[in-house]
Image (cartoon, rainbow, N blue to C red):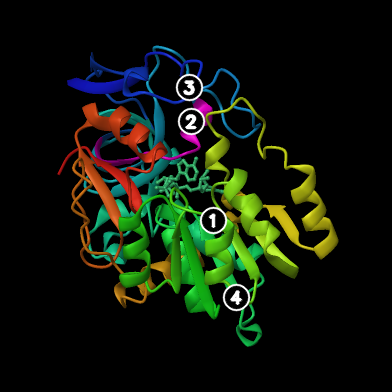
Amino acid sequence: MQVQRIVLNSRPGRDGAPVPENFCLEEITLAPDLKDGEVLVRTLYLSVDPYMRCRMNEDTGTDYLTPWQLSECVDGGGVGVVEASRCSTCSVGDVVTSFNWPWQTHAVMTGSGLQKVDPKLVDGRLSYFLGAVGITGLTALLGVREKGHINKEAKQTMVVSGAAGACGSLAGQIGRLDGCERVVGICGSDEKCKALVEDLAFSASINYRRGDVPAQLKESCPDGVDVYFDNVGGAISDAVIEQMNHGGHVILCGQISQYNKDVPYPPPLSERTQEVLRSKGITRERFMVLSFMSKAEAAIWELSQWIKSAQIKASAPIASFHLCYFASYPQVLETMVSGLENMGVAFCSMMKGGNIGKQIVKISE
Ligand SMILES: NC(=O)c1ccc[n+]([C@@H]2O[C@H](COP(=O)([O-])OP(=O)(O)OC[C@H]3O[C@@H](n4cnc5c(N)ncnc54)[C@H](OP(=O)(O)O)[C@@H]3O)[C@@H](O)[C@H]2O)c1
């Protein structure tokens, strides 16, 4: 069987920004016979994620991520359907997912490494298993619950950076549902700002590419900041932390503004920001969703119910995202592009803010 796959062609150059040419499309032949325990899967959807930028380096800077190797097939989150099986736990027609799905149109995988998912949980919108009802949703929900210390009585203000992205757009909505009085999102365009307030019910939004972030924060958060869901790090986070209240909590989810730089994770903070954290007794513990997988099943159920009941809302399509079409039905924000050949383009676009909600690549029907 002839299948297409994406291999790592080169590592990012000196400025650190990935380009689509770092990836290359190839055709290979899959061996016709399955061995015991193996399944043949057809890929439906693949995920592109910020952590993948670290896998493009020879040294990922973390102990839990392995680097992608040059000329070898790239992998990440994927969902697909079983087309043939020699594994007792997988049947033809099962929908399955994995964090290590090869960027291939079809693949032979070990059945025991796949997780079976129930399409009814997402009303058949299988791409949600890579987003709001998958690791992205878990990151937002468990990040808020484990590190956010939200207390309904306390009338807290929450700020989310990367707020129009996959995790951020969910984290802000969850903060609101869990009881924050005010939820303010920071993101990179006026259209995203509009979607946050008008479609996702954020209290206010700030475009960090425009104007003075500290002044806009002061205006949007008159009572200071109690909880900060940090997806980006760098100057934006320094500005938020500066305006946090005593005893506040930073959910250290990610630091995407630093991923193209050659720094360890989490990147070092300025003296000033360290001093603010210390003097105000603000917690800032690293959050890793994979450390909380014992809570995943219940959390996935909760997310799926919120989506079915439209408590987590959708956004209307935004015209200027030409590459993408939007799955704004029924409730979740997604940016989707089609075709395995567009994996590199979609990844690089997401790293520069070309997405709203989860960036997905559709590989087959
Ligand atoms: N801790 C965990 O277990 C865990 C799990 C999953 C993800 N994460 C982290 O969560 C964060 C969000 O991931 P995601 O999958 O939801 O991606 P995402 O937010 O959907 O996409 C990345 C977004 O980052 C923003 N961005 C890019 N460069 C930026 C910069 N220099 N400054 C500010 N914003 C920038 C862009 O939006 P704008 O238009 O707003 O710039 C872009 O849309 C990442 O830091 C990721 O590493 C952590």
Q: Residue furthest left?
A: 365
Question: Residues under labels 2 and 4: Cα distance?
Answer: 36 Å
Image location (x, y in percent) of residue 211: 47, 53
Where disc 2 sits, the SS reads helix
Q: Is residue 322 left or right of residue 38?
A: left
Is the residue 161 above or below the residue 71 in the image? Answer: below
Q: Are marks 2 and 1 in contact (CB under 8 Å)?
A: no
Q: Label 1 crowding class (10 Å Cα cut-off): few <14, some 14-19, many 20+? A: some
Residue that carries the numbered disc 3 in the rendered image:
68
Q: Is residue 45 left or right of residue 141?
A: left
Left or right placement of residue 314 versus residue 270 in this view: left
Q: Amino acid at mark 2?
A: Arg
Image: 249 above or below 17: below
The answer to whether the beta carbon of the residue marked 3 is less than 8 Å from any atom of ligand 1 is no
Query: Whole-percent x and y of residue 167?
Result: 46, 55
Q: Which residue is mark 2?
A: 53
Checking the image for residue 222, the label placed there is 4
Q: Which residues are magenta?
A: 42-55
| Residue under pointer 1 | 213
Q: Position of residue 83 (x, y in %)?
A: 21, 38
Distance Cα–Cα, label 2 vs label 1: 26 Å
Q: Quadrant of residue 122?
A: bottom left
Q: Amino acid at mark 1?
A: Val
Regarding mark 3 in the picture, which secondary structure is present there?
loop
Alpha carbon separation for disc pair 1 and 4: 14 Å
